[in-house]
Amino acid sequence: MEEKKQEPIEQESTAPSIDEEIANALRTVYDPEIPVNIYELGLIYKAEKNENGRVHVQMTLTSPNCPEAAQLPINVESAVLSVPGVSDVHVELVWEPQWTPEKMSEAAKLQLNMM
């Protein structure tokens, strides 16, 4: 039986292509101040998995002064580690490009009544 390869999913034109299982795991992590998951908020800039199951996540926060700056990357690491086939996760917090509301998916904008 041939194994079916998962297609990457895309949020919006500015969003990265990310493995569906990893994207779904990231959708379980919420910014505690905004009732939308961090994936739909556009806080994930990159999530690349290599052939050894190691995942590099590049993410940002809505603000450098975010009180959850220490906790969100830990939550991201835990969520991604729960994906079958993932052996290790490195979360890199970046500030460039700066997050703006334009990075949010249409679903997030609808949820926050921004459309």
Image: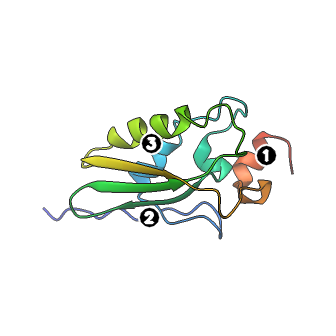
Residue 34 circle label: none
User: Relative to residue 88, is residue 82 depicted above or below?
Assistant: above
Q: Residue under circle 1? A: 110
Of the two numbered discs 1 and 2 on the same chain, state the one appearing first in sequence.
Answer: 2
User: Tag 2: residue type?
Assistant: Pro
Mark 1 or 3, which is nearer the eye? 3
Element under disc 1: helix
Gap in angstroms between the C-alphas marked 3 and 2 = 14 Å
Element under disc 2: loop
Res 54 quadrant in image:
bottom left
Q: Residue under circle 2? A: 8
Of the two numbered discs 3 and 2 on the same chain, state the one appearing first in sequence.
Answer: 2
Mark 3 and mark 2 in contact? Answer it, CB < 8 Å: no
Would residue 66 be found to the left or right of residue 9 on screen?
right
Q: Residue under circle 3? A: 25
**Closer to the camera in the image, 60 or 11:** 60
Residue 28 at x, y percent in the picture = 51, 36
Residue 23 at x, y percent in the picture = 47, 51
User: Tag 1: residue type?
Assistant: Leu
Would residue 105 be found to the left or right of residue 27 on screen?
right
User: Tag 3: residue type?
Assistant: Ala
Mark 3 or 2, which is nearer the eye? 3
Res 55 quadrant in image:
bottom left
Element under disc 3: helix
Residue 4 at x, y percent in the picture = 26, 63
